[in-house]
Image: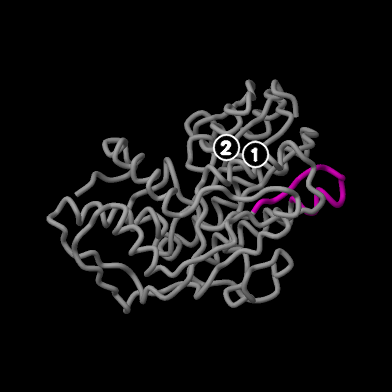
Amino acid sequence: MNKDSKIYIAGHRGMVGSAVWRALEKKGYTNLIGKTSGELDLKNQVAVLEFLKEAKPEAIIDAAARVGGILANNDFPYQFLMENLQIQNNLIDSALKCDINKFIFLGSSCIYPKLAPQPLKEEYLLTDSLEPTNEWYAIAKITGVKACQAIRKQFNKDFVSLMPTNLYGYFDNFDLKTSHVLPAMLRKFYEAKINGNSDVTLWGSGTPMREFLFVDDLAEAVVYALENKLPEYLYNVGSGKDITIKELAETMKRVIGHEGNIVWDVEKPDGTPRKLMDVSKMAALGWEYSTELQEGIEKTYQWFLENIEDIKEVKLT
């Protein structure tokens, strides 16, 4: 990649896409392109193909997806399956038809089996059944991984899949109905703090373990994959360290300065018991994360405070 290479970032306004855009600009890339959903419907096969034929990017970074937590996946299984299949299949197939050689596909650690050995290695893919609470999204993402692998094998193109662990950071989704655990928790603690340090009720037992990665660190991994030809088709991206949800809650409480109680609703599901990524393959290539969890939460909380009026979906209560 040259600094003036045309790079298309699908989903450039989302948390991941915007982080990748910032990282590339910081490194001096000057020819980045993005389209809003209003300008280009990625679920429209014809529109995507016509756009790529006209734009002729040298590389595509697919950060576009319908995403959400346990509640959203449970309530909208068809949309999480079909819309993600449509988005990624249109981008992958059109990239092949337009002879684009570099494609970076972004997925999620939920592609691995629910009870796979820990830490999760890339070779555990498709060795057992998925976590039911997010299997619809996972099946779509697995399909994308295999499509990129097939193109790599059959056409010898540099299509690579990066599977990040749980992400958080600037431009996250803080809607309590559709967000992931960390941003939802941040918002709950904030609202409880401004409402007289009221109690915070959290789902489950607090015992599941989760790994988190600041989104700007993922963006650096994407830049690394863009600038280098990675030898394999699939790589985990994470910190390689995990904590319990209870420990996350205590860290969040401390950062936000909430002085009330934490109540655990054990009638609600915990989800997968543990999801720790084995990130040794990326480490062997020379990439490692740099932002520790408390520092990342502090940065995210500061951004949240500065952007409260623009937080997506619903107003703070």
Side of 34 where 177 appears, left or right: left
The three-letter amino acid code for the residue at tag 1 is Ile
Residue 156 drawn in magenta? yes
71 falls in the magenta region: no
Compared to residue 76, the image places residue 148 above or below, namely above
Q: Position of residue 97 (x, y in %)?
A: 78, 37
Q: Which residue is at 57% across, 67% downward?
A: 276
> Counting residues from the N terminus, which is met first, the one under dot 1 or under dot 2?
2
Circle 2 crowding by C-alpha within 10 Å: few under 14, some 14–19, many from 20: many
Q: CA distance from mark 1 to mark 2?
A: 9 Å
Give the labeled residue for mark 2.
20
Tell me: 137 left or right of 306: right
Residue 252 x/y as whole percent: 33, 57
Nearer to us in this view, 307 or 315: 307
Q: Quadrant of residue 244?
A: bottom left
Which region shows up in magenta? 148-162
User: Does dot 2 land on a helix, a strand or a loop?
Assistant: helix
Nearer to the camera, 84 or 173: 173
**Residue 36 at x, y percent in the picture:** 50, 31
**Residue lying at 85% horizontally and 52% vertically, measured from the top left:** 153
- x and y percent of residue 100 in the render? 77, 34
How dense is the environment of label 1, judged by Cα within 10 Å: few (below 14), some, or many (20 and up)? many
Identify the amino acid type marked 2.
Val
Q: Give the position of the N terminus as an image quadrant.
A: top right
**Labels 1, 2: front one:** 2
Does residue 288 lie above or below 249 as drawn?
Answer: above
Q: Residue at x 24, y 54 (%)?
A: 257
Circles 1 and 2: CB atoms closer than 8 Å? yes
- Give the label on residue 145, or none: none
The quarter of the displayed image where residue 264 is located: bottom left
> Which residue is the site of mark 1?
61
